[in-house]
Amino acid sequence: MKINVERGTFLKALGHVQSVVERRNTIPILSNVLIQAAKGRLTLTATDLDIEIVESLPSDVLRNGAATAPAHMLYDIVRKMPEGSQVQAELIAGDSGRLAISAGAIRFELACLPQEDFPQVSAGTLPHRFRLNAEDLIAIIEKTRFAISTEETRFYLNGIYLHATKDKPPMLRAVATDGHRLARYELELPDGAGAIPGVIIPRKTVAELRRLLEDAEGAIEIGLSDTKVQFTFNGIELTSKLIDGSFPDYQRVIPTGNDKVLILDAKEFSQAVDRVSTISADKTRAVKLNVDKDRVTLSVVNPESGTATEELGANYRAEGLEIGFNARYLLDITGQIVGKEVLFLLADSGSPTLIEDKDDKRTLYVLMPMRV
């Protein structure tokens, strides 16, 4: 194998694929990236056995072939090459265990592992195929991923639940929850997605996909089966296992009888929460909302540090109410509000609260209160 490739293009592709490679691996070959050269293209593959990223890019292929090299080290080497340089990679003749990487007077030789040892992650048959615009897929991720649980014991909550609803009209809906808050986002059901199974896309896959989507434009091809999901765009193919478990019936925790309506300026409220929570204890970060006619008083009491209060104007006509929330959770949700106003639908101090973006009916949040 022998190739010439522009350093910037090579670096970007390496940055994409090396991110799935774990820093510490019990299986040595999983620390490597598979490099394949043929027909004027260079293909890079990396996997952790749960996720596989394959990226193809144009290259001057002088000799067809394949090799593996340590992913993070190769990325660092190319990153430190001069900008605009041409990078040459060559499997040293007669020595399948070394890969030479050079640019001008710079030369490295890296120890390789046999390409035959590199695992092939097969996507298998993906019977459900549909397309989503890049901005819609980004919105699905951004509006829900902050609520993904990090608690490994409830593994079925460690991802985003994607499914087609039975509503009229049917919608493509994404849900994430950690038991304290729930985020739901939906959009029009794309062609071909009507019969998709409800699937849970793992947290790591969501993070990798979001990063890859930074430069994406146009349509993203999505393939789905009961066990795998695949995203294809911009010469990149991301294949991932799905979480094997049943997502809970989230509809049961979305309250329907919350009749106390509180409307606030989203930005003002978010800034006020951020200010008063400055003195809160790190673990609880509890902030109390004293809701009265057309005003809300935010307060935090920390026995060790002191107190903080701030009063905001509001639109509220129901009876007065005191309720406490985790400040971090409030900031996570208000950070996703794109409209000017945020809507709180309240019941009482011990019941879950509905939070909506007044200007975006595709989003819905549920937040459990805290005792304060």
Image (tube, grey):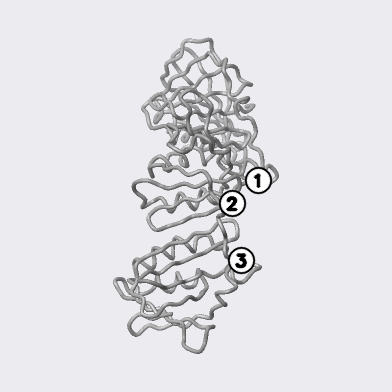
Per the model, the C-alpha gap separating discs 2 and 1 is 9 Å
Which residue is found at the position 64% from the left and 21% from the top?
Answer: 350
What residue is rendered at 59% in x and 71% in y? 29
Q: Of the two numbered discs 3 and 2 on the same chain, state the one appearing first in sequence.
A: 3
Does 119 sit above or below residue 256?
A: below
Q: Quadrant of the N terminus?
A: bottom left
* Residue drawn at 44 percent across, 60 percent down: 16
Q: Where is residue 89 in the image (x, y as percent from the top left)?
A: 41, 78
Q: Could you tell me the amino acid type at mark 3?
A: Arg
For the C terminus, the quadrant is: top right
Q: Tell me the amino acid under the disc marked 1.
A: Asp
Q: What element carries label 3?
A: loop
Q: How far apart are marks 1 and 3 (CA)?
A: 25 Å
Q: How crowded is mark 2: few (under 14 residues within 10 Å), some or many (20 or more)?
A: many
Cα–Cα gap, marks 3 and 2: 21 Å
Question: Is 343 placed left or right of 151 in the picture?
Answer: left
